[in-house]
Image (tube, rainbow, N blue to C red):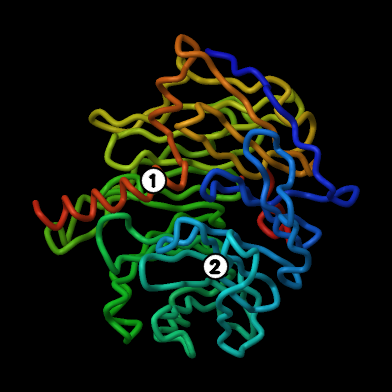
């Protein structure tokens, strides 16, 4: 096990008892949403808000924050007010607003070069996946309303396969769609029943995706495709990660797409630490706890809700329920190589995605935690 060193703790002007829901890298800064419904732009070196970097009341109940896939200085937010907004880091202003008019709270959000997608809360016995084309955003171009029967907590586009969309829900299902189809029955190409409320789900490789539940059960599934329409559908089941990884909750899983590796954040609020544990693929996926990076004291008794790794700065950022953002570093002999594997800097990932697309063309603790807002 390797130990990271705390290098900086934020000093933000958040109200007392505020949570930070999520942080992400936008250009050379961090963006954060929090329980006071603010969006803050934070200098990634000093961990202080930049001048004019506090945008108050961005939503009535902000829930989602994502980097814009077609603007390196832009990002998207969504909230319980059933609105999606696009923001420009340079002006600090909203440049686009999307709504389907249903007033159904947004719980998940993703985007690619052209499409913005939200997943809604269950309302009037319906939970919807709603898509807009940002080139003609006046109304949704797709609405899939029958594939889930509870809150939609996760959305993600496949990094290589354009038009392949994944959704996860508290109904325990992870669905895969081909959004080229407007008819929902035609669009729904695969359903994996994880059997427990989905906290996070996403693609690990071209042919595999994972599901992580709110009670920390974890499995990896094979992705159907035109080249492999009937794969071996037996998932790799890890079960409850808490006893296996000696943790009390899982923050998230950060894939390093195409490398056969990901990083899982496993936390303990009673023991006051967060472990970054490599998940690696050989014949099967497995955790290598011998090269875990531990963040001692982490956020104390508070739960870490968000983490990212800046490859260029060799810095780990964490944020959570105490309203703090913390920066951590490891030396080259103290685990840096595994931070490189888990890079998630927006600039780095976007440039890699563009290169991959070009090359491809050529060749969570207890179950109650999933409603934090």
Image height of 133 relative to 139, above or below: above
> Which residue is the extreme one toward the left?
363
Q: Which residue is mark 1?
A: 349
Q: SS class of the residue under badge 2?
A: strand
Q: Is residue 360 visible?
A: yes
Q: Position of residue 54 (x, y in %)?
A: 75, 57
Q: Which label sits in the foreground, 1 or 2?
A: 1
Q: Residues within 10 Å of mark 2 (few under 14, many from 20)?
A: many
Image height of 337 relative to 103, above or below: above
Q: With 161 as the anchor, is 123 left or right in this view?
A: right
Q: Residue at x 46, y 32 (%)?
A: 312
Q: Residue at x 74, y 62 (%)?
A: 55
Q: With 100 as the anchor, is 191 left or right in this view?
A: left
Give the camera-side residue of 236 and 106. 106
> Which residue is the extreme one toward the right?
16
Disc on the earlier residue, 1 or 2: 2
Q: Position of residue 171 (x, y in %)?
A: 54, 65
Can you tell which quarter of the image residue 11 is in?
top right
Image height of 104 relative to 108, above or below: below
Q: Which residue is mark 2?
A: 152
């Amino acid at each position: 096990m390797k130990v990271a060193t705390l290098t900086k703790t934020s000093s933000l002007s958040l109200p007392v008892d505020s949570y930070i829901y999520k942080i992400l890298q936008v250009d050379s800064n961090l963006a954060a949403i929090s329980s006071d419904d603010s969006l803050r732009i934070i200098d990634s070196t000093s961990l202080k808000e930049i001048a004019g970097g506090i945008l108050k009341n961005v939503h009535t109940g902000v829930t989602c924050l994502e980097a814009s896939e077609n603007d390196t200085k832009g990002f998207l937010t969504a909230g319980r007010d059933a609105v999606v907004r696009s923001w420009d880091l340079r002006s600090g202003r909203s440049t686009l607003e999307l709504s389907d008019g249903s007033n159904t709270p947004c719980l998940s959000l993703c985007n690619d070069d052209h499409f913005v997608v939200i997943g809604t809360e269950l309302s009037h016995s319906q939970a919807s996946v709603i898509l807009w084309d940002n080139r003609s955003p006046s109304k949704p171009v797709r609405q899939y309303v029958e594939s889930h029967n509870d809150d939609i907590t996760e959305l993600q586009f496949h990094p290589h396969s354009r038009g392949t969309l994944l959704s996860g829900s508290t109904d325990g299902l992870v669905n895969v769609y081909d959004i080229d189809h407007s008819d929902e029955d035609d669009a729904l190409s695969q359903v994996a029943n994880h059997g427990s409320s989905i906290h996070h789900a996403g693609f690990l490789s071209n042919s595999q995706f994972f599901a992580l539940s709110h009670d920390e059960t974890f499995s990896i599934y094979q992705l159907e495709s035109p080249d492999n329409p009937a794969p071996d559908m037996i998932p790799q089941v890890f079960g409850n990660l808490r006893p296996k990884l000696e943790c009390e909750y899982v923050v998230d899983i950060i894939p390093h797409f195409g490398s056969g590796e990901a990083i899982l954040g496993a936390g303990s609020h009673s023991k006051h630490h967060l472990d970054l544990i490599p998940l690696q693929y050989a014949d099967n996926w497995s955790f290598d706890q011998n090269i875990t990076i531990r963040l001692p004291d982490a956020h104390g008794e508070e739960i870490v809700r968000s983490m990212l790794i800046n490859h260029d700065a060799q810095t780990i950022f964490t944020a959570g329920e105490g309203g703090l953002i913390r920066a951590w570093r490891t030396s080259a002999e103290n685990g840096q190589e595994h931070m490189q594997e888990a890079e998630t800097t927006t600039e780095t990932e976007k440039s890699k995605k563009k290169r991959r697309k070009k090359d491809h063309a050529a060749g969570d603790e207890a179950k109650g935690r999933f409603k934090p807002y």
